[in-house]
Image (cartoon, rainbow, N blue to C red):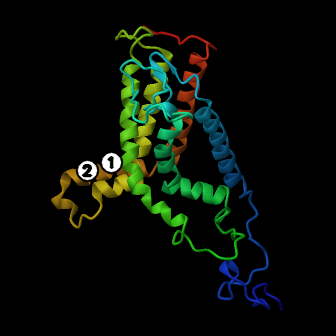
Amino acid sequence: MATGTEPRPSPGTGVHDASRAAIAARHLRTDRWWLSPAATAAGLLLFVVYSTWRAFANADYYTAPYVSPFYSPCLAEKCVPMRHGPDWDLFGSWWGISPAILILVFPLGFRLTCYYYRKAYYRGFWASPPACAVAEPHKKYSGETRFPLIMQNIHRYFFYAAVVIAGILTYDTVLTFRDAHYHWGHMGLGSVVFVVNAALIWAYTASCHSCRHIVGGRLKHFSRHPVRYRLWGWVSKLNARHMQLAWASLISIAVADFYVYLVASGVFDDPRFF
């Protein structure tokens, strides 16, 4: 009697290797398992399209006192002057394209190498694997042991850059408590948007696995390091919400940029609370 697990005539590789169970069906799941990877791919693709447009637009990214997080800090001479803002002319006038390209490489590198985002785009775009108990379509799997995926190991170094970027975005948030004439003691709707974004960026950064390792890794006795143990506990709680914080901060940074675009392009005036 056929059981569906008889050896195949010609052994394959990867999930179809002769040492694996020879199940003819691609999977035995009956639920809509494809919804999750499809939604993930759609969400990431939407952000990629939007951020690419805004990064190369090189316009409508500053209106006092708000600067788009995609353009902060602004490192080229052609940046719009920002009074007391992160307008640092480090690359001079030779940089001819959008200054956003100079800074986005760091937060982008941090997110691309993030453990959660690896899972997200591996499943959403590469189907490696597309879902639990669903075999990947590739003939073989080498993991992150070969180029280019071995470069994912630089995530810990991008973490340090992400901390600096989060600090700069916090500085930008403080500057939003000025009016259009740079007078302190004012608050607009944009201030709220920036505060929420900065909080989510810090939460996502602190929930990173690299942060958790830096805080509590390589300790043999937590009892001898009570402060680091307490910090490790806090980071671990954030780490349990790393996926949710990854998406929330991705959405919040796009919302902050879009808000600046709307105000800078004259679609509406920033509502002021005081």
Q: Quadrant of the C terminus?
A: top left
- Which mark, by number, is residue 216? none
* Residue 1, placed above or below residue 271: below
Disc 2 element: helix
Coordinates of residue 200 in the picture (x, y in percent): 45, 37
Q: Quick one: quadrant of the N terminus?
A: bottom right
Secondary structure found at label 1: helix
**What amino acid is found at the position of numbered circle 1 in the picture?**
Trp
Which amino acid is tagged 2?
A: Arg
What residue lies at 67% left-to-right and 78% top-to-bottom? 15
Neighbour tally class for label 2: few under 14, some 14-19, many 20 plus, Cα within 10 Å: some
Q: Which residue lies under the disc numbered 2?
A: 230
Residue at (79, 75) in percent of width and height: 25
In the displayed orientation, state which residue is furthest to the left: 224
In the picture shown, does residue 96 fall above or below 23?
A: above
Residue identifier under label 1: 234
Residue occupying the point 61% across, 12% down: 268
Across and down, in percent, residue 108 comes to 51, 46
Q: Are marks 2 and 1 in contact (CB under 8 Å)?
A: yes
Residue 6, located in which quarter of the rendered image? bottom right
Q: Using the numbered discs, state the Cα–Cα distance from disc 2 to disc 1 in whole angstroms.
A: 6 Å
> Which percent across, then down, holds residue 143?
56, 71
Q: How many marks?
A: 2
Label 1 neighbour load within 10 Å: few <14, some 14-19, many 20+ = some
Q: Is residue 166 above or below residue 63?
A: below
